[in-house]
Image (cartoon, rainbow, N blue to C red):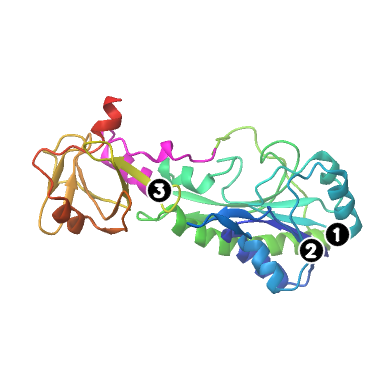
Amino acid sequence: MRLLFAGTPTPALASLDALLASRHEVVAVLTRPDARAGRGRGLAPSPVKERALEAGLPVLTPVTLRDDDVVAQVRDLGVDAAPVVAYGNLVPRALLDVPTHGWVNLHFSVLPAWRGAAPVQHAIMAGDEVTGATTFLLEEGLDTGPVLGTLTETIRPHDTSGDLLERLAVAGAQLLVHTLDALEDGRLAPVPQPPDGVSHAPKVEVEDARVRWQQPAHVVDRRVRGCTPAPGAWTTLPGGARLALGPVTQVPDVDDLGPGQVRAGKRDVLVGTATHAVRLGDVTPQGKRAMPAADWARGARLAGGVVLGAAEDAA
């Protein structure tokens, strides 16, 4: 089949590579416009655009898909299907019916669970034991279209959202190729999503990544892992300066610390929660680089009775 691939971030690269190696022909790529990035805030292409240009593919980067010229461009490509992986923009009705087999979206959950922008992060934060990926046909609703294929993936005890998304991106790429193969061969019929089991996964904002030490240790652990690497979990020091947090380890046999209370030893730093303590991993003080928590604590010369998160809790 002739394909228009739509995608933007790094997790979409595995699918683009798999399609380029498949029996199908990727004739063009649709991605978000160049965005400002890095300390210099200069314009940078998306990872998908970079890979497409390396492969010599035409690249479309419209600001909106509702422009008549964009619709005409896509129509002129004469594509049979448009696979989509984390493109980051809604496809309007005028474009949905252009490809013969529609827009085939790869979503990183087992729908109808975790519809939305951040399914992997929400699955970890919710404590799910299993997630997966789904291919489905786009329609005007958010991730509501009929299902074409699924796979499942176990969420490991120490998975961050980055770890899990990396595995799902690779496995999902093969699912996407198999889905397109089956559509071309006439071996696949879309199945409507069930009405039960719907949950939503909106974008995780910076404020959502703030650790609340008054919650149980297992909730803190999930929150940090779900927000790693983005947007990045954080707390505040006395005085209000932020401290970014890498994944933590639960310490069930230490339950004598109050929520947010710090105990710094020579080799580790423990923080209390509503249940038992957690051991900090790497931390990033405001304006500095990441470092082991014990190194940070030695340099910070923490006074006894330091409580993390007290500044925003009092606000």
Viewport quadrant of the N terminus:
bottom right
The residue positioned 30% from the left and 31% from the top of the image is 312
In what element is the residue under mark 2?
strand
Q: Is residue 151 visible?
A: no
Q: Nearer the viewer, residue 231 or 97?
A: 231
Q: Label 1: which residue?
A: 79
In reply to whether residue 222 is colored magenta, the answer given is: yes
| First reached walking from the N terminus: tag 3 or tag 1 | 1
| First reached walking from the N terminus: tag 2 or tag 3 | 2
Which class describes the residues within 10 Å of circle 2: few (<14), some (14-19), or many (20+)? many
The residue positioned 80% from the left and 41% from the top of the image is 66
How many dots with numbers?
A: 3
Indicate the amino acid at tag 3: Gly
Estimate the x, y position of residue 81 in percent, counting from the top left: 81, 57
Residue 47 vs 210, above or below: the answer is below
Check contact, mark 1 vs mark 2: CB within 8 A: yes
Q: Given this view, does label 3 or label 1 mark the residue nearer the observer?
A: 3
Residue 69 vs 83, above or below: the answer is above
Which class describes the residues within 10 Å of circle 3: few (<14), some (14-19), or many (20+)? many
The residue positioned 72% from the left and 71% from the top of the image is 20
* Alpha-carbon span between mark 3 and mark 1: 39 Å
In what element is the residue under mark 3?
loop
Quadrant location of residue 16?
Answer: bottom right
Q: Label 3: which residue?
A: 232
Q: Label 2: which residue?
A: 28
Check contact, mark 2 vs mark 3: CB within 8 A: no
Estimate the x, y position of residue 33 in percent, counting from the top left: 68, 53
Q: Which residues are magenta?
A: 202-227
Indicate the amino acid at tag 2: Ala
In reply to whether residue 46 is colored magenta, the answer given is: no
